[in-house]
Amino acid sequence: MVKPPKAKKVISDTYLHQINVLKTLSGDRSSVSRQTASLVHQQISEIAERSGLRDEKEVLRYLYILEGQKLVSPYPIGDFTSRSWCITNDGVRALKTIAQSAIQ
């Protein structure tokens, strides 16, 4: 009996945009320790520009989704009207996991 080939998993655009926002917030972390990774804050306008989304309202929506998963945080913490956001240590770990699973 021949098994059918496994269907390739497809990631929706929404998830890809969330990953792009996370990557944008992480920046180049090779020279930043894990402890200080979450101390680098970026403005929503910068995130929109660097992630390629260009729409600040859409970026803010993705930030809210990611914050609900504890992957990003506004600055000051808990101020959801803030225009300054940063990636959390959980967000850095999530990006590493995503990168590892993409290789497989």
Image (cartoon, rainbow, N blue to C red):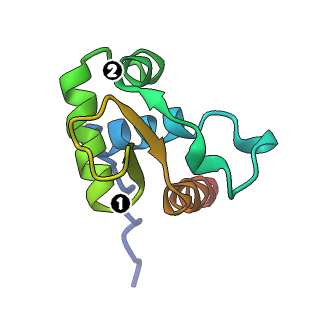
Residue plotted at (31% across, 14% down): 54
Q: Position of residue 15 (x, y in %)?
A: 31, 46
Mark 1 and mark 2: span between their CA atoms?
29 Å
Quarter where residue 104 is shown: bottom right
Task: Please say if the residues under marks 1 and 2 sit with CB atoms less than 8 Å apart.
Answer: no
- Residue at mark 2: 53
Residue plotted at (41% across, 50% down): 72
Q: Label 2 amino acid?
A: Leu
- Residue at mark 1: 7
Secondary element at tag 1: loop
Q: Label 2 crowding class (10 Å Cα cut-off): few <14, some 14-19, many 20+? A: some
Q: Is residue 57 above or below residue 97?
A: above
Q: Quadrant of the N terminus?
A: bottom left
Residue plotted at (69% across, 35% down): 28
Q: Position of residue 103 (x, y in %)?
A: 64, 54
92 left or right of 28 in image:
left
Q: Label 1 amino acid?
A: Ala
Q: Is residue 54 above or below residue 8?
A: above
Furthest-bottom residue in this view: 1
Residue plotted at (42% across, 15% down): 49
Please state which of residues 24 and 5 is positioned toward the viewer in this rendering: 24
Furthest-right residue in this view: 31
46 left or right of 30 in image:
left
Which marked residue is nearer to the observer: mark 1 or mark 2? 2
Q: Position of residue 48 (x, y in %)?
A: 36, 20
Q: Residue 103: which disc? A: none
61 left or right of 101 in image:
left
Q: Position of residue 98 (x, y in %)?
A: 53, 56
Secondary element at tag 2: loop
Quarter where residue 59 is shown: top left
